[in-house]
Amino acid sequence: MTTLKLGFIGAGFIAKFHANALKFVRGMDLAGVYALKGAEELAAHARKIGVGDCQVFSSVAELCNHCDAVAVLVPNFARIEVIEQIVAAVKAGAALKGIICEKPLGRNVAEAKRIVELGREAGIPNSYFENQTYMKSVKSTLAQLAPQQKAMGPLMLARAFEEHAGPHEGWFWNPTRQGGGALLDMGCHTIAANWFMLTPVGKDVRFLEPVAISADTCLLKWGQPKWRAQLLDTMGVDYAKTPAEDYASGMITYRNPDTGQHVKSQFSCSWMYDKQGMRMFMDGLGPGYGYELNSLVSPLEIFIGDAAAEAVADAETALEKSTASRGLLTVVANEPDLYGYVDELEDARDAFLAGRDAQFNWEYGLEITRLCMAAYLAAERGHALDLTDAELQGELDTYVPLIQQGRGAEVLHVM
């Protein structure tokens, strides 16, 4: 089996998650990393867990010249600059077989379009990493219900929720750097997951046409004085001045172009889920059938009493974003596999070695960004938007949400 040498640009939380996922991926090694900070630690971790002889490189160009493919895992505000450097390296002779970009593709439509343009300039395959659409439970659901879809018709309603207590790093909380709050951070997941689940079996991932959207953005927990002060102290972000939403929900209507049928996607995401840890919940209904998926339903539970918890406190040992180290804990034995990271890496490996884009490419990522921006605009205006309107589509090309501009206090309630 041919082995694809993968390079990481970025060495933060998500990079370590992908490195851990590589333990379960054959034919792909982590060959190198370039990052402004954390590169040595990530390389040592990769070598320790046996996912490749990972070397630290001094520039994006040097990394590109020693790898078969690279994954852009840097913060949202740095994406374009990094991808421009990758394209320059390719034009200078780097023989890359593919480029991966972690979600979201851009902080707004203009940024996402620029990244798509850069991908075309590079002239090599690409992959947009949206892990929830790759979850084994999602793929198994669609395979199990394929006969029902054929006999009874496709799904009519899909709902997806992603919730946890908040991000790990300060830039993620800053809407001018991240691009928003929970909606852009997690709405890209829930919107993509529903669109994928609603798509009739055998059809392209962009087969269903978005026709309408409504949404609401709120600041429920982190705008309160106590929690606002904690956020300022721990993350250096002042939600009294530049708040972002910690809860968002919305509804998207899609049209089946073959039948004219409308189907509904309900999405919700939050940074105020102070329970077991990160929860992904999806369910859906078709004519005579349905499904339900909950990432916190595990075959393993552990109980830790007060005395034992005080002796050893490490809340995230059991589960990403866990907020407790005692009591009855849900334990996920293999989070990278459960959340779809293993499968998206495998898809990128197979696609790049075959000389084609992955199942979800940057053009698809652009459409997810467009839907996220439409959700922000619908929330600002307080009513549903017609996504088939050409004038609205043109407006979205240059639209930057008030929250992303640092003007969130104009649309969010801060106590």
Image (cartoon, rainbow, N blue to C red):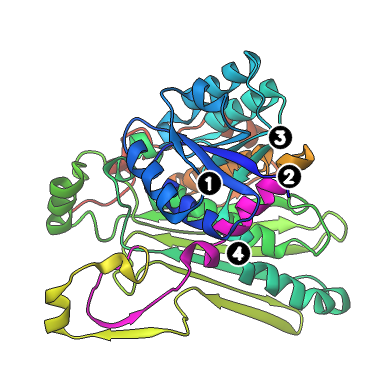
Q: Which residue is drawn at 65% across and 64% down?
A: 264
Tell me, for residue 372, which label it has, or none. 1
Q: Which of marks 2 and 3 is nearer the N terminus?
A: 3
Q: Quadrant of residue 246?
A: bottom left
In space, the residues marked 2 and 3 are separated at their CA atoms by 8 Å
Residues under numbered marks 4 and 1 in contact, where contact means CB atoms less than 8 Å apart: no
Q: Quadrant of residue 367?
A: top right
Give the quadrant of the C terminus.
bottom left
Q: In this rendering, would 218 be left or right of 121?
A: left
Secondary structure category for the residue under label 2: helix
Whichever of labels 3 and 4 marks the residue nearer the N terminus, that label is 3
* Nearer-the-camera pick, 283 or 356: 356
Which label lies toward us, 4 or 1?
4
Give the Cα distance between marks 2 and 1: 27 Å
* Mark seen at residue 135: 4
- Does 110 sit above or below residue 170? above
Per the model, the C-alpha gap separating discs 3 and 4 is 22 Å
Question: Can residue 303 be seen from the camera position used here?
Answer: yes
Question: Is 408 placed left or right of 350 in the picture?
Answer: left
Amino acid type shown at disc 2:
Ala
Give the tally of numbered discs. 4
- Say which residue appears at 18% left-offset and 69% top-offset: 313
State the CA–CA distance, disc 4 to disc 1. Answer: 21 Å
In depth, the one of 75 and 333 nearer the eye is 333
